[in-house]
Image (cartoon, rainbow, N blue to C red):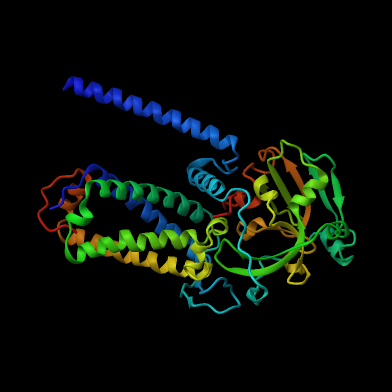
């Protein structure tokens, strides 16, 4: 009886030690391969980390979001929230965005301020993709823009780069990892359904992240910065949505 | 008479907690937009398949989403363990129960459960980029959302029946049987 108890104790000890080692190794591999999301803390962080890591491993960097035909474009496209009411934005709007600039800084070789003409001068791409809001509604639209990867090539990103952080004219901010930043369907979009991006949909330029929910596709872009750590931005959880209690990872 | 093995008992209670969390968080998420659609897209301003008669909209469902995915991982983990061990030992599902009860359990574990899981995965734009068939098998992402709702509602109906049967046919004995594995059950199992 005593022997059996001791044997069980030793066996549990060995299992616990193996468990701890495997757990530590997995954490090490995960953080080394950018599989830990910024909002990994707390009890919900466990689920978030599993979801993010599983989808990143499963999808890889280059899986393409489904593309649709022109006939699939939604007739009803809801508007979520009003345009920025800041003086700066209203001035830019009044000037038809001639003075609008996208500031790009951080871990880049050549920080720049790009005008709308600069962006439309780069190779243009189109995508007809599905965008779903986390609430549940969705629409399909055609987007025209320049690939973010092209702009990142122009400014020259540092090898330490891990995230790109986007800021809008209404203090909205979000971040994406490099896998999505370099993805061919991640656009700086200036056209929607064959015209300029309408005011209520993020004029003059919005981000488009095709493999994530709509709240990652920041409207009214004003600045983007390349960084190796998200810790210094806001509360360190990667975006204003995560600060409001929504998950940073929106590949769901 | 049910003699529930350790794995069956442990996974049962993990699933009980996980499923309750899924239902609570699922309702919170649904209340953010209580309209169901058919096809690929849908939004306010366009036609809805069903508009649920909910008098208010639950604006902030961020916690619901976090909880839903955490609970889903827990249920999937426990479910995989249950089915694996069940298959290896030929458990309960096939041998313990009979008749209508057996059909009900089989439908939940092998039909409704997988449909709920697959239709939930179909919401994911990232997974849709890897396996578009997960979406097309439902006829679009909004269809998948609608199927998810009805399959989950089916699970809820089953759970209500399950709890009522347990209560009616000897609550204490059933609890003892599912917690400590005791065989002294006075009535048919629920």
Considering the image in quadrants, where does the N terminus of chain A appear? top left
Horizontal placement of B108 versus A50: left or right?
left
Instruction: Identify which residue, A66 or B52, lies in the foreground.
Output: A66
- For image coordinates 75% across by 52% down, the residue present is A148
The answer, for residue A224, to whether it is visible in the render is: yes
Residue A84 visible, this orientation: no
Q: Position of residue B40 (x, y in %)?
A: 55, 71
User: Which residue appears farthest toward the bottom when viewing the image?
Assistant: B47
Q: Is residue A195 above or below residue A60?
A: below
- The percent coordinates of residue A209 (x first, y second) are 66, 56
Number of residue marks:
0
- Give the left or right position of residue A224, taking residue B88 as reference: right
Tell me if A119 is positioned left or right of B23 in this view.
Answer: right
Q: Residue at x 26, y 46 (%)?
A: B88
Is residue A16 positioned above or below B32 on the image? above
Q: Position of residue A101 (x, y in %)?
A: 85, 55
Q: In which quadrant is the C terminus of chain A drawn?
A: bottom right
Where is residue A213? Give x, y as percent: 60, 59
Identify which residue is drawn at 61% across, 77% down. B45
* Residue A236 picture quarter: top right
């Amino acid at each position: 009886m005593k022997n059996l108890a001791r044997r069980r104790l030793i066996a549990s000890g060995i299992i616990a030690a193996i468990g701890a080692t495997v757990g530590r190794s997995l954490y090490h591999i995960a953080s080394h391969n950018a599989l830990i999301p910024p909002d990994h803390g707390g009890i919900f962080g466990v689920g978030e980390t599993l979801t993010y890591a599983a989808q990143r491993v499963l999808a890889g960097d280059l899986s393409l979001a489904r593309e649709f035909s022109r006939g699939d474009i939604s007739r009803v496209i809801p508007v979520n929230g009003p345009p920025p009411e800041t003086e700066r934005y209203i001035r830019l709007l009044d000037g038809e965005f001639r003075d609008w600039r996208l500031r790009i800084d951080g871990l880049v070789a050549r920080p720049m301020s790009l005008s709308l003409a600069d962006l439309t001068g780069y190779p243009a791409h189109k995508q007809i993709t599905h965008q779903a809001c986390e609430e549940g509604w969705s629409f399909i639209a055609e987007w025209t823009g320049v690939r973010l990867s092209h702009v990142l090539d122009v400014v020259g990103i540092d090898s330490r780069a891990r995230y790109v952080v986007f800021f809008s004219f209404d203090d909205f901010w979000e971040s994406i990892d490099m896998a999505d930043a370099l993805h061919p369907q991640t656009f700086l979009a200036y056209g929607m359904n064959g015209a300029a991006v309408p005011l209520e949909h993020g004029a003059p330029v919005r981000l488009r992240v095709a493999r994530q929910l709509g709240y990652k596709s920041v409207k009214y872009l004003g600045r983007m910065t390349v960084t190796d750590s998200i810790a210094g931005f806001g509360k360190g959880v990667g975006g204003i949505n995560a600060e409001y209690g929504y998950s940073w990872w929106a590949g769901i | 008479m049910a003699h529930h093995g350790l794995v069956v008992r442990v996974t049962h209670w993990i699933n009980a907690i996980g499923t309750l969390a899924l239902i609570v968080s699922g309702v919170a998420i649904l209340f953010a937009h209580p309209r169901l659609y058919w096809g690929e897209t849908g939004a306010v301003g366009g036609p809805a398949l069903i508009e649920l008669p909910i008098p208010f909209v639950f604006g902030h469902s961020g916690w619901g989403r976090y909880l839903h995915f955490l609970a889903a991982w827990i249920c999937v983990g426990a479910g995989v363990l249950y089915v694996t061990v069940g298959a290896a030992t030929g458990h309960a599902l096939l041998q313990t129960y009979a008749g209508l009860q057996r059909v009900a359990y089989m439908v939940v574990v092998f039909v409704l459960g997988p449909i709920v899981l697959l239709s939930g995965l179909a919401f994911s734009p990232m997974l849709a980029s890897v396996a578009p068939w997960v979406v097309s098998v439902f006829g679009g992402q909004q269809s998948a959302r609608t199927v998810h709702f009805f399959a989950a509602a089916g699970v809820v109906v089953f759970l209500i029946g399950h709890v009522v049967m347990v209560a009616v046919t000897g609550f204490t004995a059933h609890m003892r049987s599912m917690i400590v594995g005791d065989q002294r059950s006075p009535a048919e199992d629920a």
